[in-house]
Image (tube, rainbow, N blue to C red):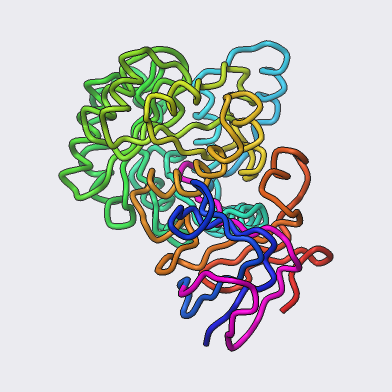
Amino acid sequence: MSTAVDNIGLLVTNDPGLGEGPLGIVRDASLVFEDGTVVAVGSAGAAADQRIDAGGRCVIPGFVDSHTHLIFAGDRAAEFAARMAGEPYAAGGIRATVASTRAASDEELRELGRIRRRDAIRAGITHMELKSGYALDVPGERRLCELGAELTDDVTFLGAHVLPTEYEHRPDDYVDLVCGEMLEACAPHARWIDVFCERGAFDPDQSRAVLDAGRRAGLGLRVHANQLGLGRGVQVAVEMQAASADHCTHLSASDVDALASSDTVATLLPATDFSTRQPYPDARRLIDAGVTVALGTNCNPGSSYTTSMSFCIALAVREMRMTAEEALTAATLGGARALRRDDVGSLRPGARADAVVLSAPSYLHIIYRAGMPLVAATIVGGSVAWAHPELGVKT
């Protein structure tokens, strides 16, 4: 059965071959999909078995969030308040979430993940990556990967998040555990492996060992890099041909050059820098150098407890010198490239039918009306996953 999203005032396809400019904008448009896939983009009034009336609103590709830590238990609001009072951010706060997550039941964690995924859908995130990393032992990391696989097919094994308390003075022993028994338990449920290459977490040699083990197990590579200061994280990511180097808050000229000469995406997480009072990444420098940039929410309890990609887009434009068009691309097509996917992030024929109907005439309102709930409806795989009860579309 075919479905047409019709009466679209402004359609962003992210395919310049379909419309105006780099966003491939089509005006007075319709979007037709069948069996969960886009089959046609054209003028309003397209024929289909059923019709969704966009009411002249703007329709954009669904947001692709390529960096989240969605499944966890516990609360770190007091830590956030302390940072707002001047206390610096440090990676060690992760251990507080580890204790709470280890103590939670499967059903508690499943429900918490389901609630956050629902909130993300309401915020227009149609596809997301999801990391483990809040158990740091073999059964717990396996459990987080298994639960994550119930929500997405882009699960990342992040056993190398920080050192658990019981291995605080035995880092090499923990790296051996991550590369051996823990990886063996988690790899069947994951697509990716990640490592926090940072002071207070794992050094470059340890990070290379983790990434190499993951590659040998058939997993793609991702790296938490250069969040807390200048370091070797980005260089390790490029050297190991990782799909993405994430955070990239502190970059040297050689880091930018390395990213520009590679296929590694720089995934920027501005809500984290907002929450930790860190400087924002220089997205303008990256883009001007030819680096592919993605935006992610980094939803987690310690440094970015949000599933609002619209908030991240507004920060990227206001604080990181991105244009509205660049930020929207980074939050959709950029996220897809960071996950090395070509089925999401655009609304071209053959792509998955993931779309967001905005309660606005243009995507510019995401920044212009920052903080407002502008998602009228979220379509995932051709089905309306959520519609605002007052602003939603008519079917």
Query: Residue lying farthest left?
Result: 216
| Quadrant the C terminus occupies | bottom right
Q: Position of residue 84 (x, y in %)?
A: 71, 18
Magenta residue span: 39-67
Determine the image quadrant of residue 322: top right
Whether residue 199 is visible to the viewer of this picture, yes or no, is yes
The residue depicted at 42 percent of the width and 50 percent of the height is 336
Whether residue 111 is visible to the viewer of this picture, yes or no, is no
Q: Position of residue 190 (x, y in %)?
A: 33, 53
Q: Nearer the viewer, residue 325 or 28?
A: 28
Q: Is residue 44 magenta?
A: yes
Tell me if 8 is positioned left or right of 162 in this view. right
How many numbered dots are placed on residues in this image?
Answer: 0
Tell me if 262 is positioned left or right of 82 in this view. left
Q: Position of residue 219 (x, y in %)?
A: 25, 48
Determine the image quadrant of residue 309: top right
Q: Nearer the viewer, residue 142 or 381?
A: 381
Query: Residue lying farthest right?
Result: 390
Q: Nearer the viewer, residue 314 or 7?
A: 7
The residue depicted at 60 percent of the width and 77 percent of the height is 4
The residue depicted at 45 percent of the width and 45 percent of the height is 335
Tell me if 11 is positioned left or right of 90 in this view. right
Q: Using the image, determine if residue 237 lies above or below residue 155.
A: above
Q: Is residue 320 magenta?
A: no
Q: Position of residue 32 (x, y in %)?
A: 54, 75
